[in-house]
């Protein structure tokens, strides 16, 4: 599967085969995104930046699984809300290009409000 439509179809099929749509309202899916993101974060908890680089190698399988869980719920949430995920990403990148101009944001971790 290489495109979003194929992934969305697989997610729908998995969900619908189990009759889970009744549980997949926007609130529950948003909660699930956050919960799975927290499980991803847990793999790095209490690690230094250097240690986290080692975790990225040693726990690659677990990381991939958690990243997939986040993506599955996020893709389904967007799909259920009829949000074109690719379009939303492109629009957000356009907004971020305005918020973070290269001249002011290069090599800076400052939030856009601090770059004014």
Image (cartoon, helix red, strand yellow):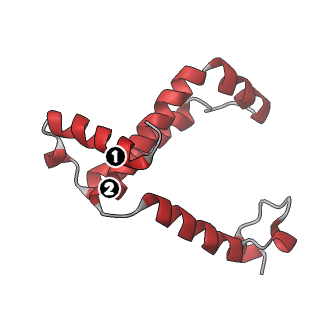
Q: Which mark is residue 8?
A: 1
Q: Nearer the viewer, residue 83 or 111?
A: 83
- Image coords of residue 93 (percent x, y): 62, 66
Q: How many marks?
A: 2
Q: Is residue 72 left or right of residue 49?
A: left
C-alpha separation, residue under disc 2 versus residue under disc 1: 7 Å
Where does the image place residue 65, in percent across and percent down from the top left? 47, 28
Crowding at mark 1 (Cα within 10 Å: few <14, some 14-19, many 20+): some
Depicted 68 relative to depicted 73: above or below: above
Name the residue carrying label 2. Answer: 79
Where residue 95 sits: x, y (%)? 61, 74
- Looking at this view, name the residue that lies furthest to the top: 58
82 or 113: nearer the viewer? 82
Residue at the location (30% across, 62% down)? 81
SS under mark 1: helix
Residue 69: image quadrant is top left
> In front here: 4 or 82?
4
């Amino acid at each position: 599967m290489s495109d979003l439509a194929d992934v969305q179809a697989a997610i729908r099929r998995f969900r619908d085969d189990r009759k889970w749509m009744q549980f997949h309202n926007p609130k529950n899916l948003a909660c699930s995104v956050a919960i799975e993101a927290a499980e991803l974060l847990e793999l790095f908890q209490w690690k230094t930046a250097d240690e986290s680089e080692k975790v990225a190698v040693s726990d690659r399988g677990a990381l991939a699984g958690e990243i997939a869980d986040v993506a599955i719920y996020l893709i389904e949430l967007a799909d259920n809300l009829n949000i074109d995920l690719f379009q939303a990403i492109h629009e957000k990148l356009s907004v971020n290009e305005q918020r973070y101009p290269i001249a002011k944001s290069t090599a800076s971790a400052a939030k856009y409000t601090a770059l004014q």
